[in-house]
């Protein structure tokens, strides 16, 4: 089943926007370098299953989203994990404590969603 998340203009450039469809929350990103393309991932951090867009201190910049809870960083277009549990709420912690924060979970990627642009609309096929 496909879902229309909105028009391209509904998603500001260089920001991570959350939107719900079919009972699931997604993160949509448009880059000013390629404004007619978008990347979409499920809005659920693979570490503890928490939101990537709601929390104490997350951020998005240059195609990379930082989880607001334990600072894991991900490439939003490939889903690749770039850094795993390096802190808490935007505050870095010593390297030795990362395993404690990871709570036994190994690094994992974001769930990337297939997306197309159809007549200016962002359409996903999860
Ligand atoms: S919930 Fe995202 S890094 Fe822990």
Image (cartoon, rainbow, N blue to C red):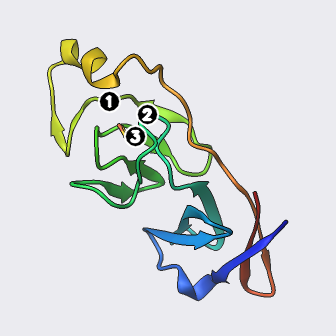
Considering the image in quadrants, where does the C terminus appear? bottom right
Mark 3 — residue? Answer: 73
Q: Is residue 25 left or right of residue 92?
A: right
Q: Secondary structure at mark 1?
A: loop
Front-most of residues 25 and 83? 25
Which residue lies at the image location 30% right of the left edge and 40% below the top edge? 71
| Residues packed near mark 1 inside 10 Å, few (<14), some (14 to 19) or many (20 plus) | many
Which residue lies at the image location 53% right of the left edge and 79% below the top edge? 11
Q: Is residue 98 above or below residue 86?
A: above
Residue 122, image x and y in percent?
70, 76
Q: Secondary structure at mark 2?
A: loop
Q: Secondary structure at mark 3?
A: strand
Q: Is mark 1 within 8 Å of ligand 1?
A: yes
* Quarter, ligand 1: top left
Mark 1 — residue? Answer: 85
Q: To which quarter of the image does residue 38 belong?
A: bottom right
| Residues packed near mark 3 inside 10 Å, few (<14), some (14 to 19) or many (20 plus) | many
Q: Is mark 2 within 8 Å of ligand 1?
A: yes
Q: Is residue 96 left or right of residue 54?
A: left
Q: Earlier in the sequence, mark 2 or mark 3?
A: 2
């Amino acid at each position: 089943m496909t879902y229309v998340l909105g028009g391209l203009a509904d998603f500001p450039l260089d920001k991570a926007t959350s939107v719900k469809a079919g009972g699931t929350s997604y993160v949509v990103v448009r880059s000013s370098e390629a404004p007619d393309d978008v990347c979409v991932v499920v809005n659920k951090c693979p570490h503890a299953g928490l939101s990537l867009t709601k929390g104490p201190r997350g951020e998005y910049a240059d195609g990379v989203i930082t989880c607001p809870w334990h600072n894991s960083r991900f490439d939003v277009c490939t889903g690749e994990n770039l850094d795993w549990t390096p802190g808490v709420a935007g505050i870095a912690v010593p390297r030795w404590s990362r395993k404690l924060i990871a709570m036994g979970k190994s690094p994992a990627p974001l769930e990337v969603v297939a997306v197309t642009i159809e007549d200016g609309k962002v359409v996903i096929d999860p």
